[in-house]
Amino acid sequence: MDQARWLDDFVPSGEHQFTKIPRKENSTNLGWHNRSSRNTPLEEWLIHWNQSGDAWGQTIGGCITVFPQLASLIGWRKRFSRKNVPVIAWCFNIGKLYSGIKQSLASAGLREIDQFVVHSKKECETVSSWLKLPESRFKFIPLQRAPIPIVTSEEMDNPFVVAMGSANRDYQTLFNAVKKLGVRTIVVAAQHSIQGLAIPSNVEVRSGLTPQQCHVLAQKARVNIIPLIEHTTGAGQVTIVEAMRMSRPVIATRCVGSEDYIDHGRTGLFVKPYSIDDLSSAIAQLWSDEKLRSSMAKEAGNYAEMNFSDESAGRHLGKILDQLT
């Protein structure tokens, strides 16, 4: 994947010009599934602060941020600046709706944002209420991913199911379901998401994997499972979208975030929150029905290409830019 490319390269209109402001990485930057804490460490905030300064200093017609931390910092810079340009907070994924001083600081900076882009429909309501901002400033656009190279195929000799991710995951229910079935299971997650859980003998837990290694596991797995707890904010969309972009059959808990991405019975299967029986039944259904897995995988890939691609997101971004400028 070309790390220099982003959605501005897929905006159809030629009326907008873009300058990318790169993040300055540090030697201790942690990758997928490796952080011991859900909170953004101070060192990360300093990196975001410096990047926001570079962006705000260079912007002429407006600013697009990715992730809430940068949006908040750009909002603070706009608040104390004479530069009044529109700001779009893309990929505004809030893991937790904090209260107290965190909520007050976030709200003070974020009220300067002109358009928030969230990746679950429900968050238009919940996040706008949390920030005490008009819901009209929030827009749902599906999370997108570029095509992921297909480098392997389903493991036939020693098949397994896989579950990846750490945010709002319900591994307790998954462990109980796969223990009941006895199917080989691989989980890729940070330690905090499985802490205190009894891990069945048929489950292998891995961490410290690169994105490419995660993609290989997803492609080899017979089924990709995203077990989620019920929460006010979305989670699991990255794992769902990437699995569908790789044309893999998916099972996910129906809740905020996931409910906007799967057409139940066609592109994947939903299960009820915290239901061991529902999850084990869905796993058994896909595990034993190769024809269904193949059909569902094909439909998932086609649906993702149409709705979760860079080209699709670029068209949405172009419409927002046209409206704001």
Image: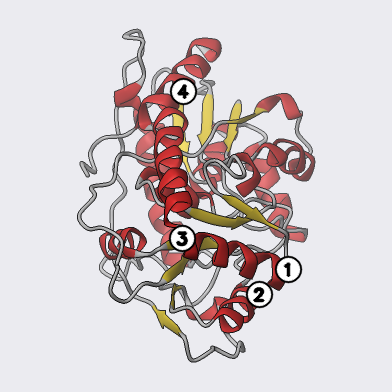
Q: Which residue is mark 1?
A: 275
The CA span between labels 1 and 3 is: 17 Å
**Image spot of residue 165 (x, y percent):** 48, 65
Amino acid type, mark 3:
Asn
Disc assigned to residue 176: none
Viewer can see residue 321:
yes
Quadrant of the image containing the N terminus: top left
Q: Which residue is mark 2?
A: 173
Residue 256 left/right relative to 36: right
> Which badge, 4 or 1, is on the more N-terminal residue?
1
Q: Which residue is mark 3?
A: 224
Q: Is residue 284 above or below residue 101?
A: below
Q: Quadrant of residue 139?
A: top right
Residue under the image location 24 percent in, 43 percent down: 3
Residue 217 left/right relative to 104: left
> Which badge, 2 or 1, is on the more N-terminal residue?
2
| Circles 2, 3 touching at the beta carbon (< 8 Å) | no
**Image spot of residue 124 (x, y percent):** 70, 36
The CA span between labels 2 and 3 is: 15 Å
Q: Quadrant of residue 126?
A: top right
Q: Is residue 310 above or below residue 272?
A: above
| Circles 4, 1 touching at the beta carbon (< 8 Å) | no
Amino acid type, mark 2:
Thr
